[in-house]
Amino acid sequence: MGTVLLYDIDGTLVTTDGGARQALLDTIIAHYGDDAGFDFGFGGMTDRGIFRRGLVQRGVAVEEDLLDRLIADYLPRLESVLARAAVHRLLPGALEMVRASVGWSGVVAGLGTGNVEAGARMKLRPFAVDALLPFGGFGCDAELRAELIAAGHRRGAARLGLPVEQTRLVVVGDTVHDIEAARANGGVTLAVATGRTSHEALVAGGAEVVVHRLDDVGAIAALARLC
């Protein structure tokens, strides 16, 4: 068997200290004059799902081309936010863990993220992580996290030259949504408490391994055992 390893981005590999959230809210403000309806946590959601939920809550009729326009407007705002180095940072241990895992025999490593792929690449490119994770499941594949993880799993299995059923799925993420999406696809999770979800909540959510940070002693070895 081979292993498909999928990394979440926000709160797992990088942080924008709320900058990406503000870029999304600024997009809504530009179109509607305020950000009413978007007063909920975005953690674990897809870009498209965030826009849809917020618009529904403010009573807007949501059509797919409207979501397409909003995401197209959001991406340059996100790029502007990410240009501010003080806001956009790689999280401790992220690069070391990714570099280690891409060298493991029988393992292919990619992304499992609610970002659309263009936004995901923007967030990773400055840190020499982007090229290490060349495939994945993204928010442009599906609005439901379990479905985008399934897309990443299929792409990883294809890289291994194996049917999905003959591969393990391992997800690294920072929310209970990551844990649930991995489980829905028969996978396991290493959860990290560098996002907005506490260590205790990740344990309660059923992750097979929970660490405080990716540079915790033994974190890489624990991931290797899952793979």
Image (spheres, rainbow, N blue to C red):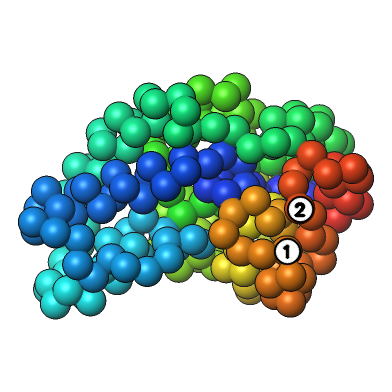
Identify the residue at horizontal 79%, vertical 54% (top origin): 211
Q: Residues within 10 Å of mark 2 (few under 14, many from 20)?
A: some
Front residue of 199 and 185? 199
- Quadrant hosting residue 59: bottom left
With 70 as the anchor, is 125 left or right in this view? Answer: right
- In the depicted structure, whether residue 27 falls above or below residue 189: above
Q: Look at mark 1 in the image and give the residue it sits on.
A: 199
On the image, the x and y values in percent for residue 144 come to: 45, 68
Q: Residues within 10 Å of mark 1 (few under 14, many from 20)?
A: many
With 149 as the anchor, is 144 left or right in this view? Answer: left
Q: Are marks 2 and 1 in contact (CB under 8 Å)?
A: yes
Nearer-N-terminus badge (2/1): 1
- In the depicted structure, whether residue 115 falls above or below residue 99: below
Front residue of 2 and 21? 21
Can residue 226 be seen in the rendering of this structure? yes
On the image, the x and y values in percent for residue 107 come to: 78, 42
- Tag 2: residue type? His
Can residue 111 be seen in the rendering of this structure? no
Q: Look at mark 2 in the image and give the residue it sits on.
A: 212
